[in-house]
Image (cartoon, rainbow, N blue to C red):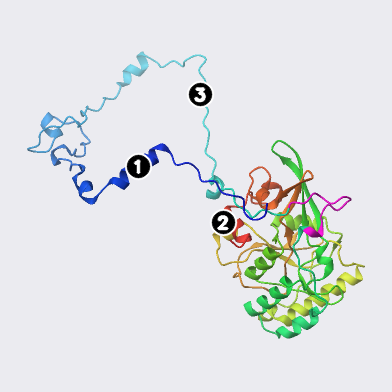
Amino acid sequence: MLGRPPVEALPRPEIGVELVQVARNMTPARALELPTPAIRPEAIVARAAPLSAPQSPADAVPDGATPSVLLAAVSPRPALRPEGLAERFPVRATPGRAEPAVQVARAADPEDEITLARYEEPAAPRLLRPRSGANPCSPRLAEIPRRRGSAPGGAAVMASLGNGSGTGRDNAIADQALAGNVPDFLRDLQPVSFTGIAGGRQTEITICVTPDYLAIGSDEDHVRVPLGLPAALRVADGFDMMLPTTRMVDAIYAQADLRLSPSPMTPGPQMSSTDYFLRHDATVDGQFARAGGRGGILVAGHKKDLVIANRLSRAPGRVAIYGWHRSNGNPIQPLSTVHGEYYADYSHGIRLVSRTAYIDGRAIDLRSLLTDGQYASLLNSDGPLNSATVRLAALQ
């Protein structure tokens, strides 16, 4: 079945039905006739009890007020035990009685105490059986349009953009991608697997990812293109895909066929220029060629990733970036939301993940795993994604 699954409304509780019926029959005149709470008489408002025991009953009530039955009797304080009494009657320990254990409350982040709601209405993905052989990921798991023979190459597209930046450039690049002007090798999705205990048993989850970062053009003439978050999400949604989590980025690097070293450039305002995009892409192409790489193999380490994370729901209008792993496996860029959502520089890349995953060989919607309390920890370092983050990832 295509589209969203039907939503069945929960039946209204009986008490709710009665309240609705009463409210419908209520007129303003009838509402004014209903009894209202009476003001408490001043005579029964208790004043603060004195620190010393009252000398007479008159001291326990205000002057001229009638004592109320609501007032608790004020008892004199007990006298201290005479010192000699302690010597005559020593206190004996009760045999066989252990002191009660004291459990100290654990200080926790407020978010740890919140039960994150599951996202119940994802659009129904095309769930395909895993492909036979070592790679279960089919190109059909991504809805990337076929590239037209007349589509321009990457160099021509980038030349048409000038050296500007911002949403205008992002929209032009996104339009090219959504029209299918991407290299054919990006359609050869690659498997990345996670294993661990979920629901009390050993579980294996396989996700299907693009072998390289989003690029515009053909296999022979293409340019890897950074994008701001809105444009990246638009492309991901158009391809029936999503951005990865930080744990996915780590796993992609660990399982990559080819790992390239980061190649930072001189920082400054020019980092977001098209010229910097092209220069860095040429550097990566050189690394790729010297390492004997070929299109379609899983390659990582040469870009930071735009990721989805629960932090985005607490930082609206921001983009989350992570990665650029060194050869020791540690990322240069920890998870950060310091930049606005439209920011993009030469070091950013758009890795896309199919919305269809496989759990022990069974096809399942990846979004349902990312919001599930049992399985999410295998795929995401900060637990289940909350519904706001999933809606952001799905452009809803």
Q: Residues within 10 Å of mark 3 (few under 14, many from 20)?
A: few
Q: Quadrant of residue 271?
A: bottom right
365 w.r.t. 165: above or below: above
- Closer to us: 328 or 20: 20
Q: On the rendered image, what quadrant is the C terminus found in?
A: bottom right
Helix, strand or loop at label 3? It is loop
Residue 349 location, x and y as percent? Answer: 73, 68
Residue in the picture at 53% in, 28% down: 101
Residue 180 in the image: x percent, y percent?
76, 71
Q: CA distance from mark 1 to mark 3?
A: 52 Å
| Magenta part of the chain | 127-140
Question: What's the amino acid at mark 3?
Answer: Glu
Mainly helix, strand or loop, the magenta region?
loop
Disc 1 residue crowd, few under 14, some 14–19, many 20+, Cα 10 Å = few
Residue at x 68% of width, y 45% of height = 375
> Is residue 12 rendered to the left or right of residue 332?
left
Q: Earlier in the sequence, mark 1 or mark 3?
A: 1
| Residue type marked 1 | Leu
Q: CA distance from mark 2 to mark 3?
A: 48 Å
Give residue 323's quadrant in the image: bottom right
The reply to whether discs 2 and 3 touch (Cβ–Cβ < 8 Å) is no
In this rendering, position of residue 353 left or right of residue 97: right
Q: Which residue is mark 3?
A: 99
Q: Which residue is mark 2?
A: 388
Residue underneath mark 1: 19
Q: Would you place residue 226 above or below residue 335 in this image?
A: below
* Residue 23 located left or right of residue 373: left
Foreground mark, 2 or 1, reads 1
